Image: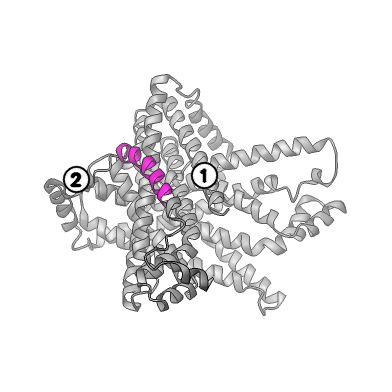
Amino acid sequence: MNATFAALPLSVPLRDPAARGRAAWVLAGLVILWPLLSIGEFHPWVLFEARNLKVVAYFLAGFLPPESSPDFLRELAQATLQTLAIATAGIALAFLIAVPLALLATQALSVSRLGPGPGQPRARWLRRAVRGLMMILRGIPELVWALVFVRVFGLGPTAGVLALGLTYGGMLAKVYAEILESGDQRPVRTLLEAGSGRLAALCYGLLPGSAQDLTSYTVYRWECAVRASVVMGFVGAGGLGQLMDQSMKMLNGGEAASILISFLLLVLLADALSSWLRRLLANTGTGNSVAGVSALALTLAGALGLAVVLSFHLLEIRLGDLLSWDAAQQIADFFVGFFPPDLSLAWLHKVAQGALETIAISALGTLLAAAGGLLLALPASGRYGRIAAAATRFVLNALRSVPELVWATLMALAAGLGPFAGVLALAVHTCGVLGRLFAESFQNASAASRNALIESGSPPFAAFCYGTLPEVLPQLVAYTLYRWEMNIRMAAILGFVGAGGLGQLLYVELSLFHYAQASTLIAAMLLLSIAVDSASAKLRSMMNR
């Protein structure tokens, strides 16, 4: 090999063999991106117009000092407790929905799979139907459920609890079923073949090996529910979000600043508590006796049960009322008005335009976030010293702690109503999420290739591009695609505050009590979410080949 390189004239440059492929990908991306820029009304220069700068400066100036009057602080404390209670009660309701759905959907507990028999086709179709129901529950954003339930039960936390229960019930059921199926199937199969019932097979065959993962994921979902309960307040479902919406509409920056500080502290507290509980669960059983593990499990179960009871009491909601026949009939009577959906050509054309706007908002917001997250991830990974890393990580945490709807409201002031405000809101919030994930990828990457290039005389930037970036690029793309799946759901509801897309159409139609048109929009949101999930999965599989 050395002789080959020695025979080459010094004037012959060594070209990058992947240059043509990269150029083709860039060209294809530009062809796709150009119409999205037009649909998303991507006009960054409007941010620097004198009128918009004046409005934003006036609003932000009102943030200082934060409101600290005793009456407002009492109201803020009550709203904070209500937000925690909504999240806890919603997760409790989601758990009650998820457990039976997961048991019906998992193949590990299917008696019909033990051998041939007439019950196999019926069981297979039942599992498909249950998985379809789970997909519908989790595919419709919780904010849409909250907006619908506000029309049924009126303003207040009841709508938020039900919305969280349905959406998170579908999420928990899907993950519960996957966790149960991913464990060792031999004990449960042995029990079922010996004639044991499904409940006994679950308790003695599956739960011993899956209980830690099931509990850990439930705790994580509670952490997510705290954030979601704030967002649902923007449609009247109580808590900090409803108080924030009132302050923003009144342009009361002092109150908005106090609410944002309270929300940031609440999110940090929820993150810390969730992380502590997950670490505690991970360490359970390591060097502990069976009696110690049982005592810990009973203590945690008692504390969680007490928290659920206190949450329902604080919200003045009875769980029996939510699960009663009267409540089900009331919801069913309301949903009857959604059928049949409006399938007229004129309305479908309008829905298609809203769907294209939603796709543009999610795609552009995710791409901008990936670019910004990549730039911030470099100092956050510690490449430029501890001070720069700590400062950048604080910025990333601040960006992701503020909900997308709050960012959308601020961006609507800066850029005006429309999809561009949604693009900016998603970009800013997602930048905080991806920046943190990208920084962790850079920290975990091996430095051998980069150091070898630097020692051979390559500049640090070239060493990063050809030494570190190729190693972590598949992971960065996977993170970005996963986030795009989440952003398509959020883009569909940013229109509730005037950021365009399907959400703006849905908010208007529900406000006008046009339920047939709203039904078409909700179906479009669900189909769009499924399509993006499928496209993202295919792109990830292509990247892994």
Visible residue check, residue 250: no
The amino acid at mark 2 is Val
What kind of residue is marked 1?
Asp
The residue lying toward the viewer, choosing from 104 and 200, is: 104
Q: Is residue 187 magenta?
A: no
Classify mark 2: helix, strand or loop: helix
Q: Which secondary structure dominates the residues rendered in magenta?
A: helix
Residue 381, percent across and down?
Answer: 40, 71
Q: Nearer the viewer, residue 470 or 208?
A: 470
Distance from the alpha carbon under mark 2 to that under mark 1:
33 Å
Q: Nearer the viewer, residue 298 or 265?
A: 265
Q: Which residue is mark 2?
A: 46
Q: Please say if 180 is above or below 118.
A: below
Examine the image and state in which quarter residue 78 appears.
bottom left
Residue 125 percent coordinates (x, y): 71, 36
What label sits on residue 533 in the rendered view?
A: 1
Toward the viewer: 440 or 326?
A: 440
The residue under the point 39% across, 40% down is 32
Asked whether the viewer can see residue 249, the reply is yes
The residue tagged with tag 1: helix, strand or loop? helix
Position in image of residue 192 (x %, y %)? 83, 52
Q: Specify whether 277 is left or right of 467.
A: right
- N-terminal of the pair, mark 2 or mark 1, is 2
Q: Residue at x 23, y 47 (%)?
A: 44
